[in-house]
Image (cartoon, rainbow, N blue to C red):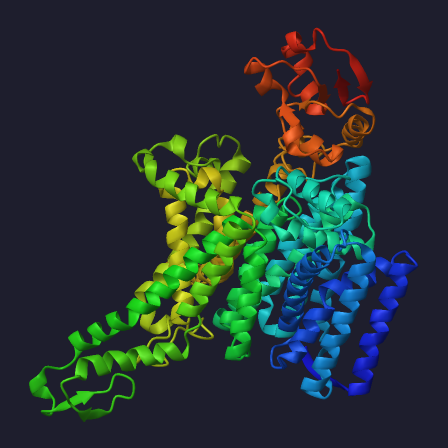
């Protein structure tokens, strides 16, 4: 499948944009069902970004590249335009700047202005559209994954209504079968089909949990949802004493803008918005990897990214994954061969700013990666020069008074400054391809410091305190108690069942292949990394050598993973699983390279090494192996299991809303220890400062004199009424919804 270009005249282009803006405005003002939601989503998600790409004259990147860039730029534009709108109108005395009318009028005006600038810059627009001339083989391979999203929608609906997981199980078996088939038929598939395969798999997977049940899923997701609803109700973004979450624009300001234009059920929008946006991230990983390992292997690398638990739980870890999406986009533009230097710098800064304002921990990790990459780029030229100097022929074998140029190989007259000239020549070549400059690193730190220290405050002090606490606890280096649960699980703790053992083994195999790939690049850096005088010789499996900066990013990411395991407290406060997930946009190609190298040592075909590990890993993280073994663990596939505490049932939501609507506002509301406080926060829309953990307060000897909110887990998994009779002896049951009760 190739791409064909379609040219639009200036008049047609301007008319098309104005017509779409007008149609969107009519749909929103008249509240036309479906049309309002679809046009509003497209209006915020793609149109501004596409116009900005046109202004920057980025016509060389392919269709998939333009789609993810348009999405990233549109989300960035929506966030920062909304922030500007919020600040400007508040300063002018308008207290609801994020309500529908101001957003619609000013965003429409900005869109028309962008279209005019794009017209002036281009004198017309060139669109790259797919040329859908598929062979019979390609049609046969493409038809099945195109039904994956439908299977997800119907399957989750069936699961929610009747606990029947047959369609979801079928989907989770068809996806690995599709991956295997596509992998073995790569020689018969055009490169243009891979983005389609990736997107169909991606959107199907991220929607499985998003469409499960009717309410917010996760732990921190309840804080996120409360902050979104608070911003929506107030009509403006502000600091609402939500500790770390106030700094995350992606969960407060961004969904408020979407809700103002789309007018969906608040919980439904919050559950599906981030999966819809983040479903593009595997395409970004594919584009990054495609340059180095080719389309077929890049497809496998992107599937590794999709197989991660953090990816599947996008609906519950929205801030983290939005930041990871823009982290991946910055890596993509930094090393994209079809984007000019000015556009690279501009896009890098924009995407980095979104990552910073989306999640503090991801931003800190991002900064350390940039810093150590920059530091490496200051050191490497000197090391290479020293190596060449040591390997140079003795002076008596060269003509007196001559010097060999390390870049051209020419012999030139010697001078007293020969060493400094040689080092300067080596350094000059690196500067030609350097993206992580001193300016970029400083600008990133300034944005991070300004946002987290000067604007929102808390995340910066927490980050500094965390670093200090880590160093103060270095004496706990070998204590297993100082490691997080993901580290202890990786070491085999509490691994009892066969599915758990399978997951443990394939997880280690996955990490091992990544490590083998990185170490292979270190050992064979002259063949795999672009360095001066390394020549054009490279392994057959590489389409292009890794830039030195990319190689250093991979080394820094690998080192960070090792540090997260070794140092105390890091994995306690921030899961190693999330760190690994953030590193995958950089490390994914090394998984494939590691499989290829292992296959060479074992004298096997690479597919026989990579695919079994990849497929078993996917089946383990999705819960398929557990289900086949009779263990009802996965929340996607069961209505009972270990994840039951994160569920919110309609009766529990109704009980929380009843307290908020009819209860007295003074004092605290007490909830059960199994996420009860957070569930009440999101469903009752009550600030977390007004909710207390019932059991903790009782154990501290404090008086319980407010409403007591109990969920199903508080009455079944841990029957608090029976286990703590002293608490309830003087209380009356004032509300009951079968599986949820309220006491006073």
| Residue 204 at x, y percent in the picture | 70, 53
| Residue 490 at x, y percent in the picture | 44, 39
Q: Residue 713 lies in what quarter of the image?
A: top right
Please state, as top left, top right, bottom left or bottom right, where the C terminus lies in the image: top right
Up the image or down, 110 lies above or below 273; here it is below
Front in this rendered view, residue 666 or 374: 666
| Residue 670 at x, y percent in the picture | 67, 22
Q: Residue at x 53, y 68 (%)?
A: 348
Task: Report whether residue 603 is seen.
Answer: no
Q: Residue 287 lies in what quarter of the image?
A: bottom right
Q: Residue at x 76, y 23 (%)?
A: 740
Q: So how many labels did they put on this image?
A: 0
Up the image or down, 580 lies above or below 593; here it is above
Q: Residue at x 20, y 73 (%)?
A: 386
Front in this rendered view, residue 656 or 232: 232
Task: Report whether residue 732 is seen.
Answer: yes
| Residue 620 at x, y percent in the picture | 57, 43
| Residue furthest to the left | 396
Q: Residue 105 lies in what quarter of the image?
A: bottom right
Front in this rendered view, residue 301 or 416: 416
Q: Residue at x 55, y 37 (%)?
A: 499
Please state, as top left, top right, bottom left or bottom right, where the N terminus lies in the image: bottom right
Compared across the picture, whether 179 is left or right of 584 comes to right
Compared across the picture, whether 239 is left or right of 216 comes to left
């Amino acid at each position: 499948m190739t791409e064909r270009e379609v040219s639009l005249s200036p008049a047609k282009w301007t008319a098309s944009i104005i017509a779409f803006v007008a149609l969107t405005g009519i749909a929103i003002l008249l509240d036309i069902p479906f049309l309002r939601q679809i046009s509003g989503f497209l209006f915020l998600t793609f149109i501004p970004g596409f116009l900005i790409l046109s202004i920057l004259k980025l016509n060389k990147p392919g269709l998939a590249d333009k789609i993810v860039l348009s999405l990233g730029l549109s989300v960035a534009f929506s966030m920062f335009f909304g922030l500007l709108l919020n600040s400007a109108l508040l300063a002018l005395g308008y207290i609801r700047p994020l309500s529908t009318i101001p957003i619609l009028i000013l965003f429409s005006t900005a869109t028309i202005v962008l279209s005019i600038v794009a017209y002036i810059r281009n004198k017309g627009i060139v669109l790259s559209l797919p040329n859908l001339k598929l062979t019979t083989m390609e049609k046969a391979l493409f038809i099945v994954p195109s039904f994956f999203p439908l299977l997800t929608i119907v399957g989750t609906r069936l699961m929610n209504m009747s606990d029947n997981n047959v369609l979801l199980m079928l989907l989770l078996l068809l996806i690995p079968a599709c991956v295997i088939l596509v992998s073995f038929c790569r020689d018969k598939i055009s490169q243009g089909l891979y983005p389609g395969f990736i997107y169909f798999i991606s959107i199907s997977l991220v929607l499985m949990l998003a469409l499960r049940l009717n309410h917010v899923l996760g732990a921190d997701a309840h804080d996120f949802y409360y902050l979104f609803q608070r911003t929506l109700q107030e009509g403006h973004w502000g600091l609402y004493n939500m500790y770390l979450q106030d700094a995350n624009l992606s969960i407060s300001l961004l969904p408020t803008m979407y809700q103002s234009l789309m007018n969906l059920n608040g919980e439904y929008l919050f559950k599906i918005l981030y999966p819809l946006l983040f479903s593009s991230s595997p395409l970004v990983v594919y584009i990054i990897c495609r340059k180095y390992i080719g389309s077929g292997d890049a497809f496998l690398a992107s599937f590794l990214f999709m197989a991660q638990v953090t990816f599947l739980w996008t609906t519950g870890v929205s801030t983290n994954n939005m930041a990871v999406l823009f982290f991946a986009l910055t890596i993509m533009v930094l090393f994209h061969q079809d984007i000019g230097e000015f556009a690279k710098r501009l896009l890098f800064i924009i995407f980095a700013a979104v990552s910073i304002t989306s999640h503090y921990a991801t931003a800190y990790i991002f900064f350390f990666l940039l810093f150590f990459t920059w530091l490496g780029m200051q050191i490497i030229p000197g090391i290479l020069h020293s190596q060449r100097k040591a390997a140079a022929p003795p002076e008596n074998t060269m003509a007196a008074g001559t010097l060999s140029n390390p870049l051209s190989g020419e012999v030139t007259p010697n001078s007293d400054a020969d060493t400094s000239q040689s080092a300067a020549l080596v350094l000059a070549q690196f500067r030609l391809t350097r993206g992580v400059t001193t300016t970029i690193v400083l600008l990133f730190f300034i944005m991070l410091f300004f946002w987290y220290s000067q604007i929102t405050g808390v995340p910066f002090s927490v980050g500094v305190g965390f670093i200090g606490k880590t160093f103060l606890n270095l004496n706990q280096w070998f204590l297993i108690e100082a490691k997080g649960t993901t580290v202890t699980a990786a070491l085999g703790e509490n691994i009892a069942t066969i599915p758990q053992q399978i997951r443990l083994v394939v997880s280690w195999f996955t990490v091992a292949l990544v490590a083998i790939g990185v170490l292979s690049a270190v050992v064979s850096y002259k063949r795999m990394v672009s360095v001066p005088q390394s020549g054009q010789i490279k392994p057959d499996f590489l389409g292009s050598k890794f830039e030195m900066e990319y190689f250093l990013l991979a080394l820094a990411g690998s080192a960070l993973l090792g540090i997260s395991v070794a140092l105390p407290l890091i994995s306690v406060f921030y899961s190693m699983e999330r760190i690994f997930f953030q590193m995958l946009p950089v490390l994914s190609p090394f998984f494939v390279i590691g499989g290829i190298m292992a296959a060479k040592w074992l004298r096997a075909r690479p597919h026989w090494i990579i695919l079994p590990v990849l497929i078993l890993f996917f089946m383990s993280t999705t819960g398929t192996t557990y289900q086949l073994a009779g263990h009802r663990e996965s929340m996607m596939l069961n209505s009972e299991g270990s994840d039951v505490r994160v569920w919110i049932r309609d009766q529990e939501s109704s009980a929380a809303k009843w307290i908020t609507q009819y209860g007295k506002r003074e004092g605290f509301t007490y909830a059960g220890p199994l996420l009860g406080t957070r569930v009440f926060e999101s469903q009752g829309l009550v600030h977390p400062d007004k909710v207390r953990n019932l059991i903790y307060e009782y154990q501290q000897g404090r008086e319980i004199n407010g409403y007591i909110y109990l969920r199903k887990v508080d009455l079944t998994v841990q029957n608090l009424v029976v286990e703590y009779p002293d608490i309830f002896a003087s209380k009356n049951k004032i509300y009951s919804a079968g599986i949820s009760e309220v006491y006073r």
